[in-house]
């Protein structure tokens, strides 16, 4: 029987109250909804929405809008549903969305009116819509927990990173996760996404205490505790409170829908990396440039070495004068001052989470002497390294 996909899209939009888009071979065909906003928020996020090759998937934007995708495998037809929010869009959320898509904030009322025509959905209900239509169209029986699992990162082995409660006996590890926890939180606070990925690829030196009777509840409780700590670290690192609290709620809600402890562990890692990436973006500024990001990564990998402006220019393939101009435009300071800022920031982190001597920190961060390190650090922070360690160390 030949299916009428236009009719299905109209029906889905009518039943759900959500915008539905029909695609054929990943090419947009039509939008079905009584209310429209231009530019179409889904079209802007097309690349991200279609990235997952599964028959059904969902994508969350940095401003907490959800989009769902389901594919008709036999006919190369795709449906995109959304945007969906779990809460009404207020003035602050509307402005954040407009800034993220490069539209003027004076369109705030227009965007709020658009979302007034779209009912907010709890995450579980939205994901259930996707699972239901996947069954109707493709015959796949899935539950929402499987859908969440399919969105988890694959870059490292979560089972080796955060061991489950039943995998470890009391005699294997002492309760010494405090240092591990503080190291992780310091990387979150300072927006060190790449370093955190490396950190997670290494086994921890301890384990969390038992806080539930079964392994699933244990991991969910750990998820709540970890998300709370990570969100606070992100706020200290510069992430705005409303974003941090909303993101925290989203991840805790997702974890409660899962039925496998291992999946909760993987979600925990994704949560920490997501917060860290957002801190990194916040510290880079809303108008950050890809060249500045490349240089930041280069500098963080070579902090113990002498770094010159000529080296940086060669690294990104630009001439020296243009690079200096670019830095001043996007950071407000020159490359030399930026390198000093990165070194000072890493010194602050090391002073609070390690017992390394001042001389070893100075050497690790490329300062020519301990006295030079102390002089630069005090100029940047208003405190000597020792004062900073005494006042801020955990």
Image (cartoon, rainbow, N blue to C red):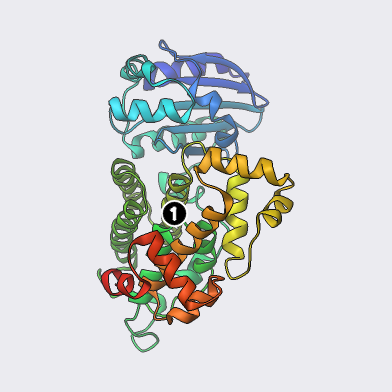
Of 240 and 272, the residue lying toward us: 240
Q: Can the viewer see residue 260 in this picture?
A: no
Residue at x 36%, y 47% (from the top left corner): 239
Pinpoint residue 8: horizontal percent, then vertical percent: 50, 18
Comparing 255 with 191, the one in front is 191
42 horizontally vs 227: left or right: right
- What residue is at 45 percent from the left and 63 percent from the top? 344
**In the rendered view, would you say 214 is above or below 73?**
below
Answer yes or no: is residue 274 visible: yes
**Residue under pointer 1:** 276
Vertical placement of 373 versus 256: above or below? Answer: below
Quadrant of the image for the C terminus? Answer: bottom left
Q: Across the whole image, how many numbered discs are drawn on residues?
A: 1
Horizontal and vertical percent position of residue 167: 42, 77
Q: Quadrant of residue 221?
A: bottom left
Residue 149 location, x and y as percent? 47, 51
How packed mark 1 is, by other alpha carbons closer than 10 Å (few <14, some 14-19, many 20 or more), is many
- Of 96 and 17, nearer the camera is 96
């Amino acid at each position: 029987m030949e299916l009428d996909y236009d009719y299905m899209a109209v029906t889905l939009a009518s039943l759900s109250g959500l915008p539905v888009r029909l695609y054929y071979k990943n090419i947009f065909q039509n939008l079905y909804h009584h209310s429209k906003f231009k530019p179409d928020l889904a079209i802007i996020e097309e690349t991200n929405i279609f990235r997952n090759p599964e028959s059904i998937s969902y994508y969350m934007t940095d401003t907490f809008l959800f989009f769902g995708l389901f594919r008709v495998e036999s006919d190369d037809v795709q449906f995109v549903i959304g945007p969906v929010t779990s809460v009404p869009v207020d003035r602050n959320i509307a402005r954040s969305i407009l800034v993220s898509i490069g539209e003027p904030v004076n369109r705030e009322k227009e965007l709020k009116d658009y979302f007034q025509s779209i009912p907010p959905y709890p995450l579980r209900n939205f994901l259930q819509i996707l699972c239901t239509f996947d069954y109707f169209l493709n015959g796949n029986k899935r539950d929402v927990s499987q859908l969440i699992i399919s969105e988890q990162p694959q870059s490292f082995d979560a089972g080796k990173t955060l061991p489950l409660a039943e995998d470890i006996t009391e005699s294997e590890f002492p309760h010494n996760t405090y240092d591990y926890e503080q190291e992780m939180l310091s990387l979150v606070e300072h927006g060190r996404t790449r370093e955190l990925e490396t950190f997670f690829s290494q086994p921890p030196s301890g384990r969390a205490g038992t806080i539930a009777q079964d392994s699933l509840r244990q991991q969910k409780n750990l998820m709540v505790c970890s998300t709370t700590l990570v969100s606070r670290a992100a706020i200290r690192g510069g992430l705005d409170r409303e974003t941090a609290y909303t993101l925290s709620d989203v991840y805790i809600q997702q974890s409660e829908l899962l039925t496998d402890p291992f999946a909760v562990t993987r979600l925990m890692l994704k949560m920490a990396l997501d917060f860290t990436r957002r801190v990194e973006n916040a510290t880079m500024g809303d108008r950050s440039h890809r060249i500045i990001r490349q240089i930041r990564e280069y500098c963080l990998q070579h902090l113990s070495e002498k770094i010159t402006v000529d080296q940086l220019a060669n690294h990104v393939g630009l001439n020296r004068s243009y690079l200096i101009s670019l830095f001043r435009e996007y950071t407000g300071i020159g490359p030399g001052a930026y390198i000093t800022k990165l070194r000072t920031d890493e010194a602050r982190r090391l002073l609070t989470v390690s017992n390394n001597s001042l001389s070893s920190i100075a050497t690790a961060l490329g300062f020519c002497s301990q006295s030079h390190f102390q002089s630069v650090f005090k100029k940047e922070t208003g405190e000597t390294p020792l004062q900073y360690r005494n006042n801020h160390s955990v």
